Every structure is written in structure tokens, then in C-alpha cells.
Image (cartoon, grey):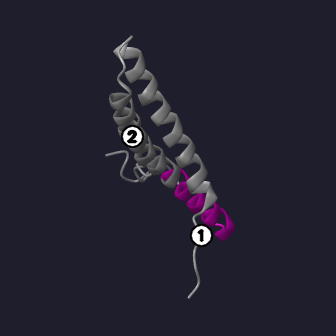
Amino acid sequence: MTRRYPNPWFVIPTLFGTVIGAGLGWSVTSATCGQQACNGWATVAAIVSGLIAMVGVGTVVVLAIRSAEEFQRASEAGEPEPGPGCEVPEDLGDT
């Protein structure tokens, strides 16, 4: 059985977005608390915002890479380039 390793084109941007999201969550919570010691809340906010960023960035990365692969596959096969997916055929557009 062959072992598949994570594709770096998916992993690197997702990890980068997760770290940025966690840092933003930590910073905003720390700034909101003011002089009070609220490291616990800042940690919770960092974890939650990091997870949200991971899901969001991961979704966008997967969709963008799939779209690029679809475009490349169509170009190599000599087919017309795929559009955004909401075109109306020309014979139906004039009704």
C-alpha cells in the first residue's frame, strides 16, 4: 500500500492562514481586555479564530486548485476553456 503525503499546495497556505487567524484572535482579545490579565480568554479566542481561518482558507485553497486543474485538463484535451458555470446557451438567451 502506498502512503500519500499531504499536498504542500494545500497545506502551506492553510497553515499560514491558520496562524494569521489565531494571531488576530489573540491580538483582538488582548487589546479588548485592556490592563486585565486575560490570557485564558485570549488563548480560547486564538484557538477558535484559528480553526475558523483554517476551514475558510482551506476551502478557498481547495476550490482554487481544483479550478486550476480543471482549466489545465481542458486546455490539454483541446476542449474549450471552462467558464464560471453560469452561462446560458446562446440559443436560450434570446427568448
Q: CA distance from mark 2 to mark 1?
A: 25 Å
Q: Point out the image quarter for the N terminus.
A: bottom right
Q: Position of residue 37 (x, y in %)?
A: 37, 20
Quick check: is 54 in the magenta stretch?
no
CB atoms of marks 2 and 1 within 8 Å: no
**Residue 79 in view here:** no
Q: Would you place residue 10 above or below residue 33 in this image? A: below
* Residue type at the position of mark 2: Ile
User: In this figure, which residue is indicated by the disc labeled 1?
Assistant: 5
Comparing 5 with 43, the one in front is 43
For residue 10, which quarter of the picture?
bottom right
Comparing 62 with 36, the one in front is 36
Q: Residues within 10 Å of mark 1 (few under 14, many from 20)?
A: few
For residue 71, which quarter of the picture?
bottom right
Question: Is 27 on the left or on the right of 1, as rendered?
Answer: left
Q: Would you place residue 45 above or below residue 88 in this image? A: above
User: In this figure, which residue is indicated by the disc labeled 2?
Assistant: 47
Which numbered tag is attached to residue 53?
none
Q: Position of residue 38 (x, y in %)?
A: 35, 23
Residue found at x 57% / y 55%: 11
* Residue type at the position of mark 1: Tyr
